[in-house]
Image (cartoon, grey):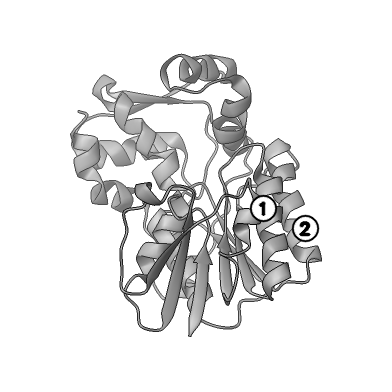
Amino acid sequence: MRRILVTTGNGMFGRALIEQLLDRDDVLVRAMVRDRASFKLSGSNLEVVVGDMDDPASLVEPTKDVSHVFLTSPMDERITARESAVVDACAANGSPLVVNIYGAVRHEGDHLDQLHTAAIDHLKLSGLPWTLVSPSSVMETSLAPIAAQLPMGMFFGMSGGGKVGLVALEDVARVMAEVVLTDGHEGQNYLCTGPAAVDMTQVAAAFSEVLGREIRYEDLPEDDFADLLLEHAGYSDRAELEVTVLCHLRAWKEGRADLVTKTVEQVTGRPPMSVSEWISGHVADFQATT
């Protein structure tokens, strides 16, 4: 019986993986959260434990007696410290396969990449078996914020004509589930993308087609776009904005996000969703704002 610890059970990737595994009789799922009251999922094979990556002592019990650990952390300055603390707890408790989220967008040594690669280097040096799941930019985080701008008939960005292999969270979750449920994945880096690389003008055309009204894309200089987000999107400062948004869109613009792979279909047996298919599946969310 596989026993899988999912860190950040309330996070985007952690929750998506848990949803793929709920109520199966061949796996036990241990969801680690900081706040038990905020965790709303339930299932016959689900255990919920409290642990905090900022408190290494709290990671001892969650990492005991598991065969796999799904590891991801919030996208901020503490990525390296948090993920290294989980790796250390795992190594002290046994030798589970650690499935770590990385990324398919080529950040080429920027600050976010330095944080991630330092954590991955620590994992590889730990002696634990590992697998990387590396999605391209995810539609849920890249496209969902557009909803608030749609009443204007446009949305803003800074990626120019740069293309990105946008991938749906559900497709990434299916890959993650396959990795923890089957053997033969140790030492692999699964680069997960959608079926095509698209620029934001093409994304606007997809919104227009699905919603039945014209949606335009307006490209802005980076500083103007950053000022817009700082004023209207709730970011605390430019440093937070850099790690969570700007470095990603800069990579798109510079042609470092245009990778397209067949990984999702090869691993799961089913092709990934296109942008149009994803928008159609979330059309109620976008129509509510128009």
- Whole-angstrom CA distance, mark 1 to mark 2, is 15 Å
The image shows residue 137, relative to residue 65, as above or below, that is above
Quadrant where the image shows the C terminus: top left
Residue 12 visible in image: yes
Element marked by disc 2: helix
Q: Which residue is mark 2?
A: 122
**Residue 207, picture quadrant:** top left
Decide which of 120, 35 is in the foreground and name it.
35
**Label located before the other in sequence (1 or 2):** 1
Identity of the residue drawn at 68% across and 63% down:
89
Decide which of 41, 289 is in the foreground and name it.
41
The disc label shown at residue 56, or none: 1
Q: Amino acid at mark 2?
A: His
From the viewer's perspective, is the residue at label 1 or at label 2 nearer? Answer: 1
Residue 271 visible in image: no
Decide which of 278, 231 is in the foreground and name it.
231
Q: Amino acid at mark 1?
A: Pro
Identity of the residue drawn at 22% across and 44% down:
283
At label 2, counting other C-alpha atoms closer than 10 Å, the crowd grade (few under 14, some 14-19, many 20 or more) is some
Identity of the residue drawn at 47% across and 54% down:
13
Element marked by disc 1: helix
The image shows residue 42, relative to residue 111, as above or below, that is below
**Residue 265, picture quadrant:** bottom left
The image shows residue 96, relative to residue 283, as above or below, that is below
